[in-house]
Image (spheres, coloured by chain):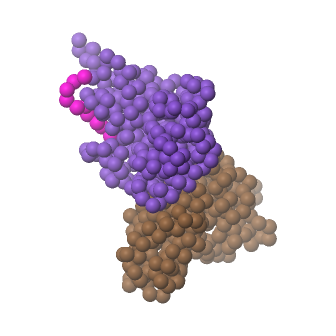
Chain colours: A brown, B purple
């Protein structure tokens, strides 16, 4: 009995990592879908952003993040970062003894559920766009769907400045989305392929619908990832009444107090600084 | 004689490092001021940007960059990155057997040479602004000078997108500089306290002069750093006729071919990838 005790306490939390604090939008969805679960969140804020980096660098940093979570005996790993999901999922899955859920596959499912004509746009970081991961995931399910992807590097600093629904946000959105619709005028669904972008959802939905001259559905990965996590846990999900713990770690603490609550949508007790 | 040979070839190049490619604006000035010198440049592009990070993280990464240059026997280290200069210069100088030149002191000298009324504005990254390094450097030389500093996180991605003189650049410049002039309406000199900002010089000069309703001098550290390097080398400067070598290293190669020539102002033969 005594020897079983450590096993009983092992693999109890869900691990979530992101290059920064944007992944807290996934934690937010997770806490709605699975309120009884404990969550360990790691933001690699010392090396954020991943989106402008090469696949080799993203894979190296992502493996270090996952190792940190696995060392804390998580039962499931969620890669909240689209860039890490798009470029490093195979390496992460191969290195993990527990299931690993990326952002791309759930986002692709959401897009296919929302589109009526199969014309889908995805916006994200340069690394996500270069990976072609969304096209691969979408065309594996529907070979006739047409995906058009565009990198939008200004959206992350706009979200972090809190300039999310003003003249500048609208002009930047218009410039990027004009490029997207020039490549495919029939796009009826826009995937927010970066955890920062949900903060710009209103302006993106408005400008996209204006440019398309009809309603454009805007989807992101967060809710779909939480549903995928629920399915993966199945009957193993923690159904206790009291809310689960949320323990947050970061590799750098600059601006966390200011930025993190915006993405999580609730107050935070704070981040513990770790060295990876 | 044979034993002296290694010493003869040691400490021959000038080492320059930056968090990314922006520091090539300093290399550009250095190649004008000291054309015969060999230069080794390191961009820590895997961990760029430093400007949103804490002093502890910036110091750690900066020391690793300097170690890389010292291992290549440079005779002088230039910290092209304002953030690293503002937060890590004492640690870098203490760890180096050769002189270390930061960006802040030369920038402060340029500002004091340009101002007529002692009201100076500096724009840079969050880390540079929080460090108060420019105020410290300027007030050490002129206790009556008044410095007002503002972090402008949107300028780096604008420069990297090449959106440097259009409607969006003007609106972003106007929003930030309005905040700066609201704090001190008498500013007559603006220091570009980040190596990316010289790419936005025209729009910043125009908007600043509009807001001030008079000419505002715009200065940066690059030329002043090159002059400081020339003084530091003195008679030891290489005065040969043929141009010196430029060897570039980076910790990540993503987007380098696109971005680097914009900052250097001449074609590059390429970067060698290194792991720090």
At x 41% / y 83%, what residue is drawn? A186
What count of labels does the image hold? 0
Above or below B97: residue B35: below
Q: Which residues are magenta?
A: B239-249
Q: Which quadrant, please, contains the N terminus of chain A?
A: bottom right
Displayed quadrant of residue B236 = top left
Task: Tell me if B130 is positioned left or right of B171 in this view.
Answer: right
Task: Tell me if A129 is positioned left or right of B104 in this view.
Answer: left
Where is residue B54 drawn, in percent x and y?
Answer: 59, 42
Task: Tell me if A160 is positioned left or right of A35 in this view.
Answer: left
Q: Residue furthest left?
A: B242
Displayed quadrant of residue B25 = top left
Q: Nearer the viewer, residue A19 or B137?
A: B137
Above or below B194: residue A244: below
Does the magenta run of residues contain B117?
no
Q: Nearer the viewer, residue A54 or B260?
A: B260
Where is residue B110 drawn, in percent x and y?
Answer: 46, 31
Residue A82 visible (yes or no): no
Q: Residue furthest top?
A: B1
At x 27% / y 14%, what residue is drawn? B4
At x 52% / y 24%, what residue is drawn? B94
Residue A187 visible (yes or no): yes
Where is residue B106 drawn, in percent x and y?
Answer: 46, 30
At x 46% / y 81%, what residue is drawn? A212
Above or below A196: residue B124: above
Where is residue A200 drawn, in percent x and y?
Answer: 57, 67
């Amino acid at each position: 009995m005594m020897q079983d005790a450590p096993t009983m306490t092992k693999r109890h939390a869900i691990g979530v990592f992101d290059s920064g604090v944007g992944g807290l939008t996934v934690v937010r969805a997770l806490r709605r879908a699975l309120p009884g679960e404990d969550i360990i969140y790691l933001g690699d804020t010392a090396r954020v952003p991943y989106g402008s980096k090469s696949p080799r660098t993203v894979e190296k940093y992502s493996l270090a993040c996952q190792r940190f979570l696995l060392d804390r005996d998580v039962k499931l790993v969620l890669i909240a970062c689209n860039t890490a999901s798009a470029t490093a999922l195979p390496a992460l899955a191969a290195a993990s003894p527990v299931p690993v859920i990326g952002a791309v596959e759930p986002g692709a499912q959401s897009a296919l559920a929302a589109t009526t004509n199969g014309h889908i746009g995805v916006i994200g970081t340069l690394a996500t766009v270069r990976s072609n991961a969304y096209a691969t995931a979408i065309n594996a399910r529907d070979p006739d769907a047409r995906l058009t992807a565009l990198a939008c590097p200004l959206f992350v600093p706009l979200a972090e400045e809190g300039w999310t629904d003003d003249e500048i946000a609208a002009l930047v959105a218009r410039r990027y989305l004009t490029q997207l619709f020039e490549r495919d005028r029939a796009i009826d669904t826009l995937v927010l392929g970066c955890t920062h972008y949900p903060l710009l959802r209103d302006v993106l939905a408005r400008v996209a619908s204006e440019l398309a001259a009809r309603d454009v559905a805007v989807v992101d990965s967060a809710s779909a990832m939480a549903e995928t996590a629920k399915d993966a846990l199945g009957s193993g999900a923690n159904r206790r009444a009291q809310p689960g713990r949320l323990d947050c770690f970061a590799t750098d603490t600059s601006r966390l107090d200011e930025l993190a609550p915006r993405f999580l949508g609730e107050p935070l007790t704070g981040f513990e600084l770790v060295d990876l």
